[in-house]
Image (spheres, rainbow, N blue to C red):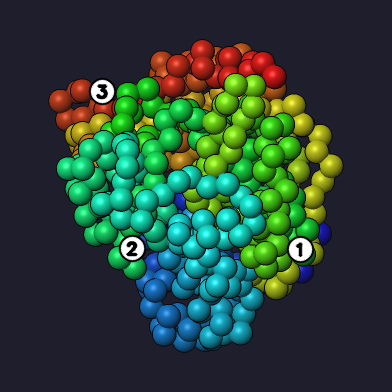
Amino acid sequence: MYNELKGKKLLILAGGVNLISLVERAKQLGVYTIVTDYYGIDDSPAKKYADESWQVSWSDLDTLEKLCRENQIDGITTGYSETPVGCCIELCKRLGLPCYCTNEQLELTKDKILFKTQCRRNAVPVVNEYPSPEEVTHFPVIVKPTDRAGSIGVSVATDPESLKTAYDYAMKMSYCKNVIIEDFIYNGSKFDVTYAVCSGNISLLSTCDTVNAKDNGFERVVQSGWLFPSKYNSEFLKKADTPIRNMIKDLGIFDGYIFFSGFAIENGDDVDFVFFETGFRLSGGHMYNYMIRRGVVNLLDIFISHALTGNTRLVKFEKEEQNLLKYAVINYYATSGTITNISGDDKIRALPDYTFSTHPAGIGKVCNTDHAILSKIHMFHFCNESPDALAEDVEYANSVYSVTDENGNDMVYDRIDPEIIKNWWNRSK
């Protein structure tokens, strides 16, 4: 099916740990892979998996344009962050190569204020926001740069004094120097939904719920796990699927992968949905692994195929064979200290239900607790039809996984209670 991709040269912008799976998938399809960023190979994990690497920043477009021409690059792609996506759009434009995303689509999906304007235009409900710090009427609120993803620059404020600190921090972290202040939703479950678009055909891929760390309070927004499918899946299909599909069409998206983040708020027997951001790119949770295990599609193929052919006609969605599968992703974050020892991850990877993991922070990483988001050490994925089996996987992972500082102190911020997973999908209708 992918024979025409064999031997083609794909340039991947950025070499962080998240890009490893994209490199590996492209190589499985017979594609010659090149990874480029500013760092040397020892500090750019994906470069170790690529056929070739360049030590050129993905933002140095003049140098990359020259190298692409000299090396007859057939396609360019990236993922997991809007900034390299913007560079990918511009570089492809210079070289006359295809890119799944336009500048307008990128702006409308990365800017949280523009996104919410687009939501209102398509009757997609959104989280309430305040025009300025002076107009905040009640607390807590969450404060974010309008143009950053991955929880960068995010803080929770519980009073006017902490609001000023949070606002200044978000402004500092914003490229465009713009900040959004929203109600902090604490009476709902964070809810995510993902869609694939191939040749204009929109497919709902998955819904998921977030399990927050038990000690977050109003100070942190640490997400200790994601559970698929959402226990609110049927209500979402009735209430919010159609307007979101209309919004995807309104954005003019023809090929790609897009996710929406919001909250499911129980209101008696009913459930309301409100949304606050989207991403027209690969997400750092690597949720495509759930689709692979369900036998539907490998979403990485959308980005690889489009970059090298200009379309997604090679990407085929199979009839789902594992529609009862449930999926649990658990995240281990760090408290303050310097990571000195990590153990137990090899035992977790040996579990039959284990499917995937990433390791963003390693030995020597200095971690702090100054902000609402902490340093992620490890992420593990598990898949099984049985919630009980997934709960057992998580219980075992919690028992064997250890991260300590130079004094032997435990550095793991939170471990999900397996009982939460066991009972998550038992919600009465």
Left or right of residue 243, residue 82 in this image:
left
Q: Nearer the viewer, residue 342 or 411?
A: 411
Q: Which residue is mark 3?
A: 410
What residue is at 54 percent from the left and 31 percent from the top?
A: 265
In the rendered image of this protein, does residue 427 appear above or below residue 151? above
Q: Amino acid at mark 2?
A: Asn
Query: Residue 384's x, y, as percent?
Result: 66, 24
Left or right of residue 8, residue 130 in this image:
left
As helix, strand or loop, the secondary structure at mark 3 comes to loop
Query: Residue 49's x, y, as percent?
Result: 50, 55
Quarter assignment of residue 22: bottom right
Q: Which residue is mark 2?
A: 178
Q: Which residue is mark 1?
A: 200
Q: Nearer the viewer, mark 1 or mark 2?
A: 2
In contact (CB < 8 Å): disc 2 and disc 3:
no
Quarter assignment of residue 64: bottom left
Give the CA distance from mark 2 to mark 3. 38 Å
Say if residue 80 shows up in the picture: yes
Q: Nearer the viewer, residue 247 or 284?
A: 247
Give the CA distance from mark 3 to mark 1. 49 Å
What residue is at 77 percent from the left and 31 percent from the top?
A: 322
What residue is at 84 percent from the left and 42 percent from the top?
A: 319
